Image (tube, rainbow, N blue to C red):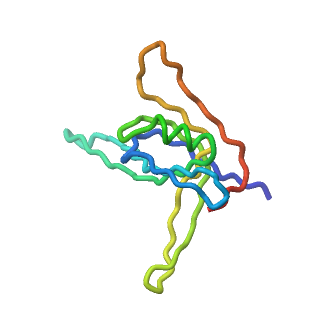
Amino acid sequence: MPALNRVQLIGYLGRDPESRFTPTGKRVTTFSLGITQRWKSGNEMKEYTDWVNVETWGRLAEICHEYLHKGSLVYVEGRLRTEKYEDKGETKYFTKVVALTLQMLDRKPSEEPVITVEEPQEEYEA
């Protein structure tokens, strides 16, 4: 049976990206992405922000670490991944987006190119 695990998001970074290296030397960069929805209810404007954790690997992780900062506007395409951990004897789960494509959407002077990076889809280790 065919399966599809793909997510597309546009939002602002809620914090500066954080990088680390795996024991095998691969770079992993993580950041939180805020996606705000706005709507009008009667005469009142309302908004709600969803926060999503994003993880990038390899060359994409290097670019995120170097060029992104809190408040950067980005388009992220990737896949959902749920992991679990133990906390005080209790199993907890969390879901994150493993980014495969990222495009910076901040307005820059015309002489600076827009950087788009696509990562090959392969199994990454945590």
Residue sitting farthest toward the left: 43
Along the viewing direction, whichever of 115 and 50 lies nearer the viewer: 115
Above or below, comparing residue 105 to residue 90 in the picture: above
Q: Nearer the viewer, residue 126 or 44?
A: 126
Rendering coords of residue 66 (x, y %): 48, 37
Q: Residue at x 59, y 30 (%)?
A: 116
Q: Residue at x 54, y 41 (%)?
A: 76
Q: Nearer the viewer, residue 25 or 89?
A: 25
Residue at image coords 63%, 48%: 6
Location of residue 75 in the rendering, given as x and y in whole percent from the top left corner? 51, 36
* Above or below for 95 versus 10: below
Q: Position of residue 59 (x, y in %)?
A: 62, 40
- Looking at the image, the residue that sits furthest to the top is 111
Q: Quadrant of residue 11?
A: top left
Q: Nearer the viewer, residue 63 or 86?
A: 63
**Image position, residue 7 (x, y; %):** 58, 47
Q: Is residue 60 left or right of residue 1?
A: left
Quadrant where the image shows the N terminus: bottom right
Residue visible at 59% across and 40% down in the picture? 60
